[in-house]
């Protein structure tokens, strides 16, 4: 059974890799959603504060260059030939052989230089022309032949053209992408983890696929408890720092990091996936390598070490087990847990693997720098040729003996080695740092210029154009069986507890390498996300335009309120449909997006209106004649309003009601009556009835005038007072103003407090129009007409009796309200008697 599980794990892992190579975007199980274009203002200010809103900073980013190029190609005609010239030069710089560069350089010269010179339209300097002509006349075609033109092209683009780009929609899109990058917070849910492919001292390495791009990575997970048990916090944090240093810049010979994040019990590094095995594994399977094969691996490793040393990083753990092969057979240096930054202070710790450590590393207290890596390189090359370290003859495992031999023994090289190889190894294995190859002042250049590497074109090595001697078998995992790799025994860390102080160590651990993330997106889902975002934004613009027409439909009519709501639709009432609703005194109308025909539901068709709950969401259930049901749900929480005939009476623009209940009364003398009742309020303020304040919470609907919502108390008072002053003047213009309902939107509002009885402009408007008399929400929150024939007694119980005597159904809420109010009245009478 275990064998079957191992096979299934391998098959799943290999299938994921194959599909990720061909169509990574199709493998994405999540989608990258760009924020709204309004994020532009925030991001522009953010970039300006960090001095990143410059041509060089944006043009040298992958996504920035793509958007700037798209802008120029579609908007700026004068920049098109310059950008094409720029891209041709970049393609020329990637060419392998001198013959190819000579042919391509002449083509570029004829098309972009000579043609413009003949037409007297060449916009570049004579110095740049002379530079190219001189080299071409001598048939000298270095990769940087057109570098003067690169400089002048960038100078011409960074002026007015770049300023126009900043003002364009393409810069808005750049801000959207940049906002996504800055808000990446990774968890385990962002990756699909496959089989284990390796194990180290603190954790395991898994093959994984990133959910939103479909790209395959290696996930190195370190156990925080095991780190604490072995006191390896410094090593774990140091590896993250070293990976961040070497992962910038384009180096194809180091296993670089793209992301770092942590969970409550794991530290996770997301690294380049190398599925070709390591040199130690292939050495055991393939046997020792020839000098020619070893030269190939040595050349690529030297470039990897040079990349680290240029960033003042010494590796300190160079050995075959840390050299990984990709699927094509090219190698990369991995596992930077022991690497160290020597830019400010040289290290002096004795760390590494016995048999590969330099003498100065073994001598405690002796400071060293990159010299240690060149000695380790000599030891590793010797093992690739002979199968063992030069200081581990007879396969001894005694660490002290190995260290003693490293410090004292002169390495004897076999006669089968060529003189050039002997010279290389003797130079690298010098115990005296001052005489060691690579430590004489020129660094990696000394090793690259050694006679052993004569005939090597290092530009072709960098471009990985030399054929690898060993290509890993395709369709194989090239790693030990998952069960052979095994897992850690959890009993070892059973007594270890992670404290808050332990977690505090890793608060700055998360990291995203911007350059590598943008490259990943550009290679996978960049075009698809841009296309989807363009469609969504176009749809929103069309919807906003349509919404304007929908609001126009309500103008000039007796529409009480209108806005988007969710309606339970389809034949089985299982799917929520977004519809635009209009509430009129005697009917409800609605239509779907893009529909011109209005749907209609009259008040006579409605039997009851109830409040219900569907999947923890409050809904309104309308029972219709014929046994049908009509279920509505608000898109957002907002302020509750009371509906009485054609009059809409919110408790003001910033009042909140609690526990709303919608009731339908078809037998009202004024026609159908809709009321929304609440189960209680909280009184605030003093004893004066005229200035009593009430705070309301939770909600269903809201209504506000279009335009800016008043922010201060003074603004709110002025806004409420304006209609009343207009009515006091008695002008026709004031009445006409009150008759226009305006586009009323269903929106969410923050909790707030209000002063006064809550009668808004809607009451006055209705009273003047004469359609319905004004009404108010009383202490029990029942909606009552003020000009009907019902007697309004002072006592709450009598008022409820009078209200229900009209044939209204008395519900449980009314009983609760009546009982509570009655008790309050008795308490007031008793207090009054006591006081007198």
Image (spheres, grey):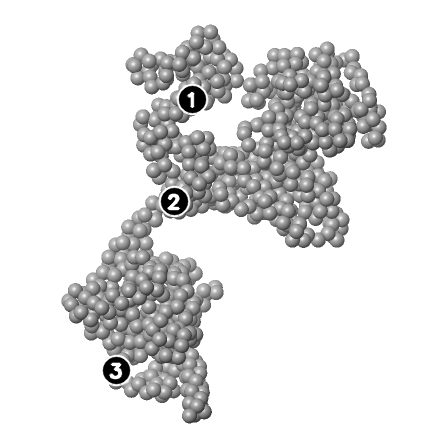
- 1 vs 3, front mark: 1
Q: Residue at 54% of width from left, 29% of height from top?
A: 249
User: How far across and down, in percent of the image, does residue 333 sit?
Assistant: 64, 29
For label 2, the residue is 41
Indicate the secondary structure of the residue bearing disc 2.
helix
For label 1, the residue is 150
The number of callouts visible is 3
- Foreground of the two, 718 or 479: 718
Q: Earlier in the sequence, mark 2 or mark 1?
A: 2
Q: Residue at 55% of width from left, 46% of height from top?
A: 186
Indicate the secondary structure of the residue bearing disc 1.
helix
- In the visual, does 416 lie left or right of 806? right
Mark 1 and mark 3 in contact? Answer it, CB < 8 Å. no
* 495, above or below 92, in the image: below
- In the visual, does 24 lie left or right of 358? left
User: How far across and down, in percent of the image, does residue 517 sit?
Assistant: 51, 37
Q: CA distance from mark 1 to mark 3?
A: 86 Å
User: How far across and down, in percent of the image, does residue 831 sit?
Assistant: 44, 88
Using the rendered view, name the quadrant where residue 775 is placed.
Answer: bottom left
Q: CA distance from mark 2 to mark 1?
A: 32 Å
Indicate the secondary structure of the residue bearing disc 3.
loop
Asked whether residue 483 is in view, the answer is no
Mark 2 and mark 1 in contact? Answer it, CB < 8 Å. no
Q: CA distance from mark 2 to mark 3?
A: 56 Å
For label 3, the residue is 788
């Amino acid at each position: 059974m275990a064998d079957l599980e191992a096979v299934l794990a391998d098959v799943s892992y290999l299938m994921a890799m194959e599909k990720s190579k061909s169509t990574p975007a199709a493998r994405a199980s999540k989608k990258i959603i760009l924020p709204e274009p309004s994020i532009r203002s925030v991001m522009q200010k953010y970039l300006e504060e960090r001095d990143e809103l410059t041509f060089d900073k944006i043009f040298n980013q992958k996504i920035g260059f793509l958007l700037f190029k798209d802008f120029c190609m579609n908007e700026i005609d004068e920049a098109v030939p310059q950008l094409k010239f720029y891209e041709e030069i970049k393609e020329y710089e990637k060419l392998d052989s001198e013959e190819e560069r000579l042919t391509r350089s002449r083509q570029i010269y004829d098309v972009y230089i000579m043609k413009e010179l003949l037409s007297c339209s060449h916009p570049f300097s004579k110095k740049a022309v002379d530079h190219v002509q001189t080299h071409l006349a001598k048939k000298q075609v270095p990769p940087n032949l057109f570098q003067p033109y690169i400089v002048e092209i960038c100078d011409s683009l960074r002026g007015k053209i770049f300023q126009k780009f900043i003002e364009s929609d393409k810069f808005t899109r750049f801000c959207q992408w940049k906002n996504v990058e800055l808000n990446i917070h990774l968890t385990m849910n962002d990756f699909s983890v496959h089989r284990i492919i390796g194990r180290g001292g603190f954790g395991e390495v898994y093959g994984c696929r990133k959910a939103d791009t479909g790209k395959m990575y290696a996930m190195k997970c370190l156990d925080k408890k095991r780190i604490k048990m072995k006191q390896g916090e410094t090593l774990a944090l140091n590896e993250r720092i070293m990976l961040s240093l070497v992962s910038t810049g384009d180096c194809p010979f180091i296993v670089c990091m793209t992301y770092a994040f942590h969970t409550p019990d794991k530290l996770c590094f997301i690294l380049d996936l190398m599925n070709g095995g390591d040199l130690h594994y292939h050495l055991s399977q393939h046997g020792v390598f020839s000098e020619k094969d070893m030269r190939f691996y040595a050349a690529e490793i030297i470039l990897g070490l040079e990349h680290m040393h240029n960033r003042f990083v010494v590796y300190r753990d160079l050995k075959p087990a840390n050299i990984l092969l990709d699927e094509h057979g090219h190698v990369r240096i991995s596992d930077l847990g022991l690497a160290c930054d020597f830019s400010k202070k040289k290290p002096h710790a004795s760390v590494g693997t016995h048999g590969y450590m330099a003498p100065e590393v073994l001598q405690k207290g002796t400071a060293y720098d990159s010299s240690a890596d060149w000695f380790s390189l000599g030891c590793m090359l010797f093992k690739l040729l002979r199968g063992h370290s030069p200081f581990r003859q007879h396969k001894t495992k005694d660490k002290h003996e190995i260290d003693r031999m490293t410090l004292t023994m002169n390495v004897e090289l076999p006669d089968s080695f060529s003189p050039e190889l002997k010279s290389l190894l003797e130079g690298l294995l010098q115990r005296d740092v001052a005489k060691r190859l690579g430590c004489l002042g020129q660094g990696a250049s000394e090793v690259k210029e050694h006679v052993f590497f004569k005939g090597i074109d290092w530009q072709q090595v960098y471009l990985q154009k030399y054929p690898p001697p060993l290509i890993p078998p395709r369709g194989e995992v090239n790693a030990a069986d998952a069960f052979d790799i095994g897992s850690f025994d959890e009993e070892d860390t059973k007594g270890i507890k992670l404290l808050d102080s332990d977690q505090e160590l890793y608060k700055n651990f998360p990291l995203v390498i911007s350059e590598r993330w943008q490259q990943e997106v550009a290679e996978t889902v960049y075009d698809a996300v841009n296309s989807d975002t363009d469609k969504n934004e176009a749809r929103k613009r069309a919807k906003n335009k349509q919404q304007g027409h929908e609001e126009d439909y309500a103008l000039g009519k007796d529409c009480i309120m209108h806005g988007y709501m969710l309606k339970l639709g389809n034949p089985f009432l299982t799917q929520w449909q977004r519809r635009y609703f209009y509430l009129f005194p005697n009917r409800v109308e609605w239509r779907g997006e893009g529909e011109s025909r209005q749907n209609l539901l009259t008040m006579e068709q409605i039997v009851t209106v109830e409040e219900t709950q569907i999947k923890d969401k409050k809904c309104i259930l309308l029972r219709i004649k014929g046994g049908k049901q009509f279920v509505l749900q608000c898109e957002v929480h907002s302020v509750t309003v009371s509906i009485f005939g054609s009059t809409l009476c919110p408790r003001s623009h910033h009042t909140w009601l609690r526990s709303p209940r919608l009731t339908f009364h078809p037998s009202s003398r004024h026609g159908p009556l809709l009321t929304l009742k609440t189960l209680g309020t909280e009184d605030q303020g003093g004893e004066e009835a005229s200035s009593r304040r009430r705070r309301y919470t939770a909600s269903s609907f809201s209504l506000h005038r279009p335009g800016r919502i008043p922010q201060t108390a003074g603004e709110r008072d002025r806004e409420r007072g304006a209609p009343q002053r207009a009515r006091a003047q008695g002008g026709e213009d004031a009445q006409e103003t009150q008759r226009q309902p305006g586009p009323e939107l269903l929106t969410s509002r923050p909790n707030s407090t209000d002063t006064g009885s809550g009668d808004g402009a809607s009451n006055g408007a209705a009273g003047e129009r004469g359609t319905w008399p004004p009404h108010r929400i009383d202490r029990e929150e029942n909606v009552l007409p003020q000009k009907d024939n019902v007697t309004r007694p002072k006592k709450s119980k009598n008022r409820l009796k009078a209200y229900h005597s009209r044939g209204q159904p008395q519900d449980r809420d009314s009983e609760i309200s009546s009982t509570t109010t009655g008790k309050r009245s008795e308490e007031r009478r008793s207090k009054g008697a006591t006081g007198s």
